[in-house]
Image (spheres, rainbow, N blue to C red):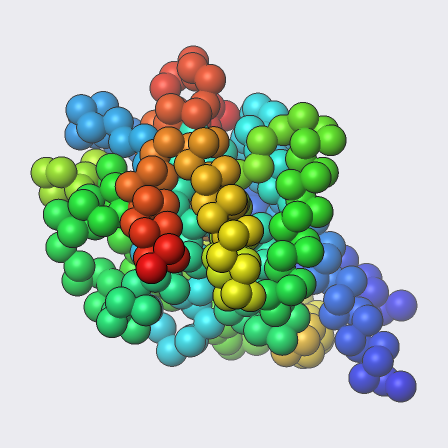
Amino acid sequence: MKLVSRIFKFLLHFLLVFMAGCVATTPFDYSSFRNHRPRSILVLPPLNQTTDVNAPYTYLSTITRPLAECGYYVFPVAVVDAYMKENGLPSPEEMHGVALEKIRNIIGADAVLYVTIEEWGQKYIIVQSVTTIKAKAQLIDTATGDIIWQGTQAVSQGSGGGDPVAMLINAAVTQVINTMVDYTHGLSRVANHTMIYDSNQGFLAGPYLPPQENDHCGNN
Amino acid sequence: MESIVSKLIATCLKRLVLLISSSIMIGCATSEPLYFWGNYEDLIYQMYMEPGSADTATQVAKLKEDINKASTIGKPVPPGLHSHLGYMYFLQGDTHAAVLELEAEKNLFPESTKFIDGLMGRLKK
């Protein structure tokens, strides 16, 4: 039973971190976004600065939904990935090197979202473990090369806190749980959602979204 | 026995975490979703992370099921779903079905025209 209560305590921490993701931050310059207003976005598999080989494609599997729900046409990520691989671009590095003109002429995307994953996965800080995802993203206009939007998103899910003995047990339990469960998939969804829906720094609404009060797709 | 129990716990936890995260995301976003998402993004995750669990036949079956469900509830399927299904048909060697799905993507989302026309040009060769 103790294990169960620890698990719930742990999930509560998780919940709190998620909620923190909805809190607003400093304003942002939207002039470039307002000048371009793309209809369609191509998301390339992210560059990976971490040692976790699963990071780029886990990220890629959670980016379509928030962008499409924000009103954009999002090219089929797996089909584009396969298409590029078949055309002599086996890695994200090579895909990121393709000229914008070529992307515009062959795929017809108005904008490309270039993502770099900077942190991914678990870190142990004394007796706590923290799962973090940090990604930097730039939305580039394929006609002009202008930066339409850019941002960095970091989300974490932590364990521990409280008295030292409890923390030790917590860390041990969390470690056991973490070896069984990959939290990065869920956390990646949260990171992408937060990045796009942030009411101060997120995306402006795309053409498929009914007109929004403040022009953003997230208006919390 | 113990490993079965721990696997079970792991599965439950994973589901719970995903459930919590998606319900919180709904909490942040105010409006009703534009699309019926079904299995599309989970299949993408599986095809890269757990390749055995999402072979082309499984993907075709699940995506067709999603398209049916979406039409039952009267919502469009998300951008990319028809092309993804078309790609799966292509991998199965069914060029005819692949072309139909690619056409469906183009009709729903004209933004895809250039890409789809390019793909179809290759398919018909």
Q: Name which residue lies at 37% across and 27% down.
A: A206
Q: Is residue A44 visible?
A: yes
**Furthest-left residue in this view:** A144
| B67 shown above or below A83 | above
**Quadrant location of the N terminus of chain A?**
bottom right
Q: Name which residue lies at 70% across and 39% down.
A: B68
Q: Is residue A35 left or right of residue B69?
A: left
Q: Nearer the viewer, residue A63 or B20?
A: A63
Q: Is residue A125 visible?
A: no
Count of marks, rendered view: 0
Q: Name which residue lies at 68% across and 75% down.
A: A180
Image coordinates of residue A146 in percent, x first then y, are: 13, 39
Image coordinates of residue A160 in percent, x first then y, are: 62, 65
Q: Is residue A85 left or right of residue B37?
A: left
Image coordinates of residue A31 in percent, x first then y, are: 18, 25
Image coordinates of residue A139 in percent, x first then y, are: 25, 43
Q: Is residue B117 left or right of residue A10?
A: left
Which image quadrant for residue A166? bottom right
Q: Name which residue lies at 67% across and 26% down.
A: B74
Q: Nearer the viewer, residue B15 or A89?
A: A89
| B95 shown above or below A163 | above
